[in-house]
Amino acid sequence: MSITIMELATFRLKREPTTMADFEEANLPMLGGCQACGATVAAYNSCPTKSGYIACVGCVPEHFGYETVEQANYAVFLYPAAREKLRNLLFAALKDFEPWVDDEDICVVVDKVNFSIKICD
């Protein structure tokens, strides 16, 4: 079963959210729309998905949502920040060896198994 936005917010805040301000503090939506069916959803009946959108509990298939709050927290909040940090470190290192490379030339491609860094075409 996929975790809900409410469960992820509770994990991030270390307490149960009760107001819109609590969800803003957790950097999560309290209300939204299902990416699949378009239904209006709230935190208790919506799930973060691997596509980056939210879906209602009826539409999110088992392989599309996150099984644990730790998985979801990493994918939604920590992974993008780590990827950007890696990109910035690489750019700084490349500037020493390839002065013609600018910030827009660096691509970092990461999946769950491999990562590659290249100079974009």
Image (tube, helix red, strand yellow):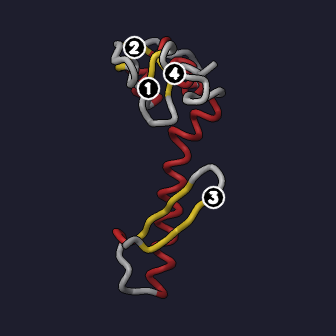
x and y percentages locating residue 92 in the rendered image: 47, 75
Do the numbered discs 1 and 2 sit on residues whose CB atoms are within 8 Å? yes
Q: Residue at x 62, y 49 (%)?
A: 112
Tell me whether circle 4 and circle 2 mark residues in contact (CB < 8 Å): no
> How far apart, in angstroms, are the residues tagged by discs 4 and 2?
13 Å
Q: Amino acid at mark 3?
A: Asn
| Among the two numbered marks 4 and 2 on one chain, the one whose residue lies closer to the N terminus | 2
Mark 4 or mark 1, which is nearer the start of the sequence?
Answer: 1
What residue sits right under mark 4 in the picture? 60
Q: Is residue 37 above or below residue 77?
A: above
Mark number displayed over residue 41:
2
Q: Is residue 57 above or below residue 69?
A: above
| Foreground residue among 22 and 35 | 35
Q: Where does label 3 land, which residue?
A: 114
Looking at marks 3 and 1 on the same chain, the residue that comes earlier in the sequence is marked by 1
Gap between marks 1 and 2 measured at Cα: 9 Å
